[in-house]
Amino acid sequence: MDSIFKALNDETRRSILELLRQKDMTAGEIADAFDISKPSISHHLDILKRADLVSSEKKGQFIVYSLNTTIVDDIIKWIISLKK
Amino acid sequence: MDSIFKALNDETRRSILELLRQKDMTAGEIADAFDISKPSISHHLDILKRADLVSSEKKGQFIVYSLNTTIVDDIIKWIISLKK
DNA sequence: TAGATATTTAGACAAATGTCTAAATAATAT
DNA sequence: ATATTATTTAGACATTTGTCTAAATATCTA
């Protein structure tokens, strides 16, 4: 749970999740959507991956990232539990 | 949204929310539940308050904190939106 | 085999964060 | 009034975080 909230605690990473909600994207495509260096985006993707919020698959020289909706359920459960 | 995720990005603060889910508590009672100094807990409560996750009311020399379940809905909405 | 493209790793650095102790503020009780 | 109790504010400090540039790794193409 800690790594998930840590991952969500950044506007850029939340935006990446919103992008991936629409379609899978390569690391480069994701980086192009932001005014941040590719290494920084790569670092953000690593944090999202460690939190299991996204998964990645190598396709030739590209790496395609996609959203992991299953983990999202865990967050929802935790938050809903606050409402009793 | 930023202040909410920031507030949730700490195990101590998440535990405070779980405590307040059960009943309202004074700052001192909350502090007693953790092995952390009172000023630190006071700081955590301030962050939770700024995120509007808790509210506080002065009762004599005590300050009673309670959970704000309405804001919780906003988080749930954002997270559910990730699932399309 | 080179050279170009895609991505990550390494290392540096400033800013933000969580913690502490000491002091300040406010209300209660003797 | 003075002392006690409850809580916050202020300031310091080490750790974590987000960013960058430069270099490394891996794949594709001519």
Image (cartoon, coloured by chain):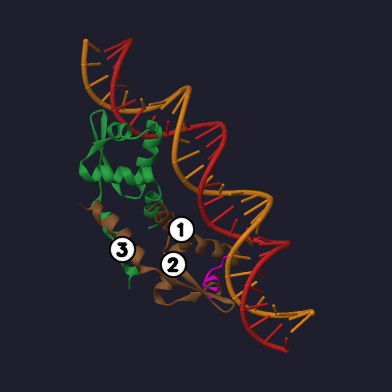
Chain colours: A green, B brown, C red, D orange
| Picture disc at residue B47 | none
Magenta run includes residue B34? yes
User: Can residue B37 be seen here?
Assistant: no
Q: Image height check: is B70 above or below D19?
A: below
Discs 2 and 1 carry the same chain letter: yes
Q: Give the residue pinned by disc 2.
A: B54
Verify CB contact (< 8 Å) between mark 1 and mark 3.
no
Q: In the rendered structure, which segment of residues is drawn in magenta?
A: B29-37
Kind of residue at badge 1: Asp
Residue located at (34% from left, 64% from top): B72
Kind of residue at badge 2: Val
Verify CB contact (< 8 Å) between mark 2 and mark 1.
no
- In this view, the residue in front, B61 or D11, is B61
Magenta run includes residue B66? no
Distance, label 1 to label 3, CA atoms, is 20 Å
| Picture disc at residue B10 | 1
